[in-house]
Image: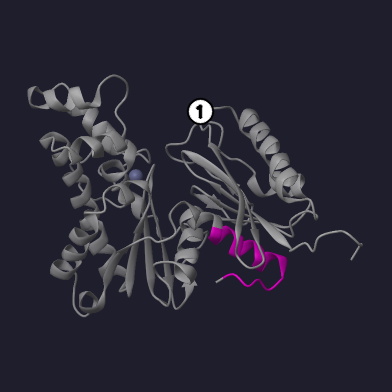
Amino acid sequence: MVMGMPAVKPWVASIDIGGTWTRFAAVTIDGEVRGRERFATGAESSPDMVRARWRDRWAALIEREGSGGPPVAVGIGATGPVERDSGRLLEVPNAGPGLQGAELVAEFRMLSGVPVVLERDTCAALLAEAHAGAGAGCSELVYVTVSTGVGGAVLSDSRLVLGRAGGAGEIGHVIADPAGPLCGCGRTGCLEAIASGPAIAAAATRMLGEPAAGRLRELLGEGEPTGLRVSEAAAVGDPVAIAILATARDALARSIVDLANTFDPERIVVGGSVAEGNPGWIPVLQHAVREQALRPTRDALSVVPAALGDDAVLLGAARLAWEESGIASGMP
Ligand SMILES: [Zn+2]
């Protein structure tokens, strides 16, 4: 070591590209998340604008965290579907032109000069929750996230269930109500089209013309409704907002029971901003499983809130990056 230089811990760069926010962070060999930064994914922007933003923010991360050297690897968890072999995003429902077909692995390999690993964001979050979060100790685990989209991932025998190309577990695109709204994927009544934040906002927009929605119109005020503002209206007792959220929650409950019967997990972890904003949903989901799932699945299955919040994808992507680097990390 050069005299006067501080001892530098190896680190990986961890990137979470979500439908709304993109997060960059450094994760040290013992699992400490440092230098978090969040910016709008900018899905409405052109591919060139999105890439220019990544280059800019990558340089800022290296400036902040790379004084002792570059990361040993980069882990990316991205809103799906991702093509794992080629390292790119495919056509992403509900995302604009900036992300479609993005060559994520090639882009960040060029920026970083180190190995890059890409996984669907829900799979990364599942790994993090399974090791250090609400699913710790479970070898049979299902993770569901309800946020800008609805996604899921499955752990069986302590391994990710990926399917042929990594698409397994896309719970957002199972039909939760055949009479429901049109989904971004082209089908009608997908869980995502009913329970995601934008779906809740769209349901409010559809209701605003109704005579019964006078108070909701007042509560939402000017501008486009959002899922968060519908939740806030429900929290102060607006019956229309409460009914919209109950529809979303009940669709989620039906799909959770389907997941329970399909995978027979020990635990189902439910995360994402919509679920976090409606903590009263968890006991309803647990009740649905207890009442409706088959035996013996229902006897020991618990439905629990996610524990890692906004860090879940970053932590899961970091785990994958450490694996890719070949360096044994001390991450929990
Ligand atoms: Zn769909």
The residue lying furthest to the right in this view is 2
**Disc 1 within 8 angstroms of ligand 1 (CB):** no
Residue pictured at 48% horizontal, 69% vertical: 132
Residue pictured at 24% horizontal, 35% vertical: 230
Check the picture and name the quadrant holding the N terminus.
bottom right
The residue lying furthest to the front in this view is 4
Decide whether the magenta segment is chiefly helix, strand or loop.
helix
Percent from the top left, x then y, of residue 50? Answer: 61, 33
Percent from the top left, x then y, of residue 145? Answer: 37, 53
Residue pictured at 74% horizontal, 60% vertical: 72
Q: Quadrant of residue 101?
A: top right
Q: Is residue 94 above or below residue 145?
A: above
Q: Is residue 162 visible?
A: no
Q: Is residue 243 visible?
A: yes
Q: Is residue 14 above or below residue 95?
A: below
As for residue 322 lying within the magenta part, the answer is: yes
Name the side, left or right, on which 104 lies relative to 177.
Answer: right
Q: Quadrant of residue 136?
A: bottom left
Name the side, left or right, on which 10 lies relative to 245.
Answer: right
Q: Quadrant of ligand 1?
A: top left
Under tag 1, what secondary structure? loop
Range drawn in magenta: 315-331
Percent from the top left, x then y, of residue 249? Answer: 21, 50
Percent from the top left, x then y, of residue 221? Answer: 25, 21
Along the line of sight, which residue is nearer the eye, 141 or 97? 141
- Picture colour scheme: one colour
Q: Amino acid at mark 1?
A: Glu
Q: Which residue is mark 1?
A: 44
Check the picture and name the quadrant holding the C terminus.
bottom right
Q: Residues within 10 Å of mark 1 (few under 14, many from 20)?
A: few
As for residue 20 lying within the magenta part, the answer is: no
